[in-house]
Amino acid sequence: MSVYFVGAGPGDPELITLKGKRLLEEADITIYAGSLVNPQLLQYTRKGSEIFDSASMDLEEIISIIEKGINEGKKVVRLHTGDPAIYGAIQEQINLLEQKSISYEVIPGVSSMAAAAAALKREFTQPGVTQSIIITRIEGRTPVPQKEDLSLLSRHQGSMCIFLSVQKIDEVVSRLQEGYSPETPVAVIYKASWPEEKIVLGNLSDIADRVKEEEIEKTAMILVGDFIRGSGEPSKLYDSGFTHGFREAKQ
Ligand code: SAH
């Protein structure tokens, strides 16, 4: 038997993968991150299966539930919000499972950065605007390496997805202003794909005030960059004068 780290997606219970849903249906034990995972996803679990909320547990407690389950021949799902590989804190669990020779798999999920772009109806990578996305955060209890400080990353002026940082919006804005112009658009998406989703639009000069007016202090994605204007050039992919592997150019 194996442990499955499953990406739950950003909130909407239809945004889990088919594989993730199947594993939830089959699981004997599900441990979910109650602070962010939509509890509606637990509807997919089997009646009589065991369900634990990891919000109040430490790493040892989580691992001991997993280990006990595996020793009893049970199928264990560890359900993480969004995609487990982005600020998912799965590595420390994986390392302990490896020490104990417990096998595991990771099932990817729809990250909140994708759900936030979908809510905005914008493409991060528009030709003529930028071809790069920076995924980052401001430091909290977890430090961020100095060379990745927002003030340094902002110099690239690409599309940016800032996780875990809306509670420090003033500091975020002041560091971003070192690289981006004050008119650079910013969107803060609260609870993307949940019924209570909110989109706050502005630019680097006014977004902090708008976010405070809306009283958004957590579970929000800060998106930054000219991609938000949606004014990029058409891509070559659908350009009628451009040949690629699946289509010949029209004359
Ligand atoms: N692994 C997750 C991120 C976990 S870190 C993922 O891939 O999305 C938690 C942070 O993710 C939150 O502080 C917030 O910045 C962001 N987040 C998670 N769910 C969100 C949602 N539905 N809408 C907006 N931001 C969200």
Image (spheres, helix red, strand yellow):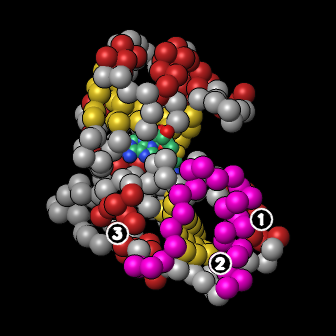
In which quadrant will I find the C terminus? bottom left
Point out which mark residue 26 bears.
Answer: none
**Residue at (28% x, 33% y) in the render:** 199
Total labels drawn: 3
Determine which residue is flagged by label 3: 43
Q: Is residue 120 above or below residue 68?
A: above
- Looking at the rendered structure, the secondary structure element under dot 2 is helix
Would residue 124 appear left or right of 62 to someone viewing this image?
left
Apparent side of residue 81 relative to residue 67 in the rendered image (left or right): left
Quadrant containing the N terminus in the rendered view: bottom right
Counting residues from the N terminus, which is met first, the one under dot 3 or under dot 2? Answer: 3
Res. 69 mark: 2
Q: Nearer the viewer, mark 3 or mark 1?
A: 3
Q: Identify the residue at horizontal 54%, vertical 63% (top origin).
A: 52
User: Label 1 belongs to which residue?
Assistant: 96
User: Where's residue 19, x and y in %?
Assistant: 43, 76
Image coordinates of residue 118 in percent, x first then y, are 29, 48
* Label 1: element kind: helix
Q: Secondary structure at mark 3?
A: helix
- Which amino acid does the dot numbered 3 rest on? Gln
